[in-house]
Image (cartoon, rainbow, N blue to C red):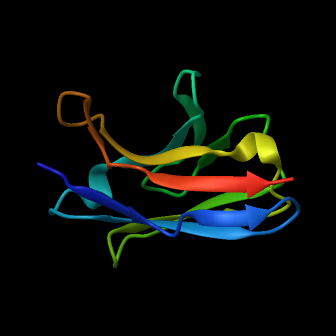
Amino acid sequence: QVQLVESGGGLVQAGGSLGLSCAASGSLFNSTVMGWYRQAPQKQRELVATITTGGTTNYADSVKGRFTISRDNAKNTVYLRMIRLKPEDTAVYYCNAFLPLYGNMNYWGRGTQVTVSS
């Protein structure tokens, strides 16, 4: 069982910056692919970024060059640094833990709201 708790959301003006954190419980963090997803009102949840245990990252085209995902395995925490934010980045951001070595199990946090005003 993995529990994820996000923090760091809020309201920011367009062009501003914001950082999100996701703390994971349990002893399997070093076996997880961590990711951030987001869901805007009346839209489907979409991938923002992922990071493997070895630090390989993957980003949605819409956030490349503006968002940076990172992880601290010693702290069981994954981060998302967001700069040059746009109104279309407004969404609930969810932390995800994917365990490919444990039956492809997926765990989700409750989400944190990010609102970018124009």
Given residues 49 and 54, the one toward you in this image is 49
Using the image, determine if residue 81 lies above or below residue 118. below
Using the image, determine if residue 2 lies above or below residue 99. below
Res 63 seen here:
no
What residue is shown at x 58% (from left), y 30% (from top)?
41
Horizontal arrangement in the rendering, residue 77 relative to residue 15 (left or right): left
Q: Position of residue 32 (x, y in %)?
A: 33, 49
Res 84 seen here:
yes
What residue is shown at x 68% (from left), y 60% (from top)?
68
Q: Position of residue 84 (x, y in %)?
A: 86, 60
Given residues 44 and 70, the one toward you in this image is 44
Res. 49 image quadrant: top right
What residue is shown at x 15% (from left), y 63% (from top)?
27
Horizontal arrangement in the rendering, residue 2 relative to residue 18 (left or right): left
What residue is shown at x 23% (from left), y 37% (from top)?
101
Outermost residue to the front: 118
Horizontal arrangement in the rendering, residue 66 relative to residue 23 (left or right): right
Horizontal arrangement in the rendering, residue 55 relative to residue 26 (left or right): right
Given residues 98 and 52, the one toward you in this image is 98
Q: Position of residue 61 (x, y in %)?
A: 78, 34
